Image (tube, grey):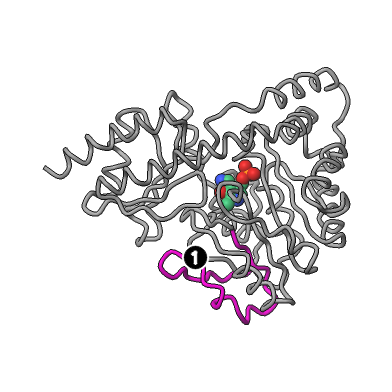
Amino acid sequence: MSRFLHKKFKSLIPYDTSEEIESMKGYVRLNTNESPFEPSPKARSYAFQASQGLNFYSDPECSLLAEKISSMFGVKQSEIVFGNGSDEILNFIFAAFCENGAAFPDITYSFYKILADYYGVDYVTIPLRDFRISPEDYNELNERTIFIANPNAPTGIALTLRELEKIITSNRDSLIVIDEAYVDFGAESAVKFVRKYDNVIVIRTFSKSRSLAGARLGWCMTSENIARDMKTIKNTLTPYNINAMTQAAALGALEDEEYTQKNIALIRMTRDNTKTRLREMGFEVLDSSTNFLFARHKTISGEKIFNGLKKYKIIIRRFSNPPELADFNRITIGSTEQMQILLEIMKGIVKNETK
Ligand code: PMP
């Protein structure tokens, strides 16, 4: 730490990317819930075409994308905000709307806590029950902004729309942020609530089902007033936050819905087959509505499973914190071939460890 760092940042604990950097060194990457499939050919060719205009600044409103999303998702362009990944959307929300504090599940996407700490937001965490979010626990939150990943990560379990609506209607003085990073893999989108209620933000990303994690693009849909506030924050901090090649690639991806849907179907099928096979090997696997599985073995520690796979250059995500997750690992669903290899190696690990 240098002597110039502001004292308010001296105890910051940032998002830990060390394992992600390690995984880029020749590993099969099943640790960050990316898509195993390349971006759609249309996304790539649009990005290449856009590279010709890189001498100009990018469109700060992402107008072509906003137009496309507006027609696909039934919201107005003025109700859409784009971020450099959905992480940046979360950043804008914590900056703008958490004066009365925040609330989120005790086990959920780790970035909520990291951003709350960064902005000095007072937050409460609400325990899951049997790995599930229980809507009845989301009462009397005193105008705190409520963050719900649906489906939740790392559990993979989704709430129904009826359950989500219960949280919204019990907290009409709170802003409800529904993070739908994984919704395409098996949950129902809450986007219709953006029209019905004025206290809802639905966040989406291009990083998962649309194979564009490296392009960094997320967006949210919300009421016009909330969107305007968020754009004030965006235009203060990073007016040109989405680069031109990313805007073009994302448009290409949206125009190739067939490609996205085909990949989603394949991931879901591979996920369900992998789940069955892991259960046969003695794993407890939570029912997932996402592109990952959250699993622990009945007798073998999570660490042994993790290290056993790492020896074969496969990297999954370990959860050592909180203690009740100590034996869980989160396994991203890769291609069918990658999962076949994983299962073969896993069979060997289980056999060796239970001798
Ligand atoms: N929300 C959830 C629940 C996530 O798991 C992730 C990524 N791991 C994100 C948001 C952020 O994704 P991105 O910034 O790539 O859009």
Taking depth in this image into account, of 341 and 8 the one nearest to the observer is 341
Corner quadrant of residue 230: bottom right
Image point (79%, 67%), residue name: 196
Q: Is residue 235 above or below residue 49?
A: below
Q: Is residue 111 above or below residue 197?
A: above
Q: Position of residue 249 (x, y in %)?
A: 73, 29
Quadrant location of the N terminus? top right
Residue range highlighted in magenta:
122-149
**Mark 1 sits near ligand 1, with its Cβ under 8 Å away:** no
Taking depth in this image into account, of 12 and 67 the one nearest to the observer is 67
Q: Is residue 100 above or below residue 226?
A: below
Q: Position of residue 11 (x, y in %)?
A: 55, 56
Residue type, mark 1 in image: Asp
The residue indicated by pointer 1 is 106
Q: Residues within 10 Å of mark 1 (few under 14, many from 20)?
A: some
Quadrant location of the C terminus? top left
Can residue 79 be seen in the rendering of this structure? Answer: yes
Taking depth in this image into account, of 123 and 85 the one nearest to the observer is 85
Assign a secondary structure to mark 1. loop
Is residue 134 part of the magenta span, yes or no?
yes
Image point (62%, 56%), residue name: 188
Image point (47%, 31%), residue name: 335
